[in-house]
Image: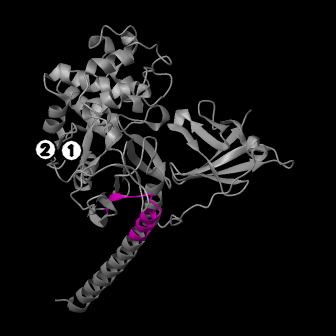
Amino acid sequence: MKNYKHFSFFIFFNIIVFTSNINAQNDSITQKLDEYLQAANKVNKFNGNALIVQQGEVLLQKSYGYKNFATHVLNDSNTIFQIGSVTKQFTATVILKLQEEGKLSVQDKLSKYFPQFKYANKITLENLLTHTSGIYNYTNDIDEADSAIVCNPADKQLALDLIFKHNLDFKPGTQFRYCNSGYYLLGMIIEKVTGKSYEQNVRDIIFTPLQMTHSLFDFKHSADTNIATGYQTLNDSIQKEASAWRWDSTVSYAAGAIWSTTGDMHKWAQAIADKKILAAESWKAMLTPHLDKYGYGVYIDSVFNKQTISHGGGLAGFITYLCYYPGEDVTVILLNNEGWFGEALNGISTDLSAIIFHKSYELMSDHVSIKLPDVVLKKYIGQYDFDKKHHAYITLENEQLQLEAPQGGLPKSPLFAEDETNFYLKIINARIEFVKDASGNITGLISYYNGKDEFCKKVR
């Protein structure tokens, strides 16, 4: 009989050494992740909760900054944040579940549910899910003058009147244009075919089976003390609450009404990873990219050549981002209670991913901007094309350059100069490098954002 004692010991010893090395690597990654978010918090770019998980192991679960500055209460793992447009993937999941039950089809015409809309026969539910319907975005008409309406429970007919009074922006199915109206209508369709509220459907189909016990629909009057205070600005010298402009959940509704925690959002990310709740065919449909890499309620894209399933959300006082890497089984969840419409955490998520995947990154720091004379700033004004469908526009207003990319979802935002070549966008933490010819004329720009650099040619 052979003696395997020494051989077994050798294997056991090597397993211990290998495991120790992995643990040491993960400890180092955790330290770097924390260091990055501490730096982001220091320069007022992240105030909230982060949960980062790789193959079932928590790399980082930590809170940064204040849940409520006035009472000096810090964020903790139980803090509840508004997740905004991340809600859309929950709405899409309910639609697909109802399709499995034979109660509707994503190929149904909108006219089946809203025959009063003159263009309804040209639009399918899939067009609504993929932002390819061409219908008017009802949130375009909401500004601070409407706070008396939108910060209180609102009648759905108000939204319908806004949506249905406009012509289509384009022929359905031919273009992508991010549109909250589509998901608002999907919420109403869910109610029509089930006889239950949208909120109850989400609870029954998703929250309860996944034990997402800390997720809710606020309707402004929740007594849960874990709900974070949202801030438009939060730093040592300015603490401007966004509560006076916090939309009621009946306004954001199926396009953005959910509040949640990092722990509950991780349960949801695991449901995506393990293909829970829905049948395999439904998940395949949801995660198939259409125009502009959008599936049903999620973007299907890549970062560092690794596939991502992701979505962000931005409302008054809250910015969120959920990103899942299916090939690497990595989840990045960021919930922030400081910010404003149009701001995003994509860049922070990419930098955190760079740490995990051993790519280059830089710690956040305060940018030092310089003032350039108008005669110089005027050189940058114009239209820049990424391709035939995606354009960026640079204007000069009150001695301040503004950059807008409508098809990419970037509203008009200030562009700050570090020198005559390099500029940055505070709103999404992106860097812009202008390209010049031998005569010093601006011929294009390079956008550095979300782990990618893209050239954009100046056309006029």
> What range is drawn magenta here?
34-54
In the image, 447 versus 9, the foreground residue is: 447
**Residue 48 to residue 156: above or below:** below
Asked where in the image residue 381 lies, by quadrant, the reply is top right
| Label 2 sits on residue | 209
Secondary structure under the numbered disc 2 in the rendered image:
loop
Question: Which image quadrant is residue 85 in?
Answer: top left
Q: Is residue 51 visible?
A: no
- Mark 1 vs 2: CB contact within 8 A: yes
Residue 426 lies in the magenta-colored region: no
Which residue is at the front of the view, 287 or 110? 110
Q: Amino acid at mark 2?
A: Pro
Q: Residue at x 38, y 18 (%)?
A: 163
Amino acid marked by disc 1: Lys
Q: Quadrant of the C terminus?
A: top right
- Residue sitting nearer the eye, 35 or 370: 370
Outermost right residue: 439
First along the sequence among labels 1 and 2: 2
> Which image quarter holds the N terminus?
bottom left
Mark 2: give few (<14), some (14-19) or many (20+) Cα within 10 Å: few
- Horizontal placement of 67 versus 383: left or right? left
Query: Image point 19% across, 43% down: which residue?
Result: 216
Q: Residues within 10 Å of mark 1 (few under 14, many from 20)?
A: some
| Place of residue 309 in the rendered image (x, y in percent of width and height, measured from the top left) | 38, 46
140 vs 273, left or right, is right
Q: Say which residue label 1 marks.
A: 276
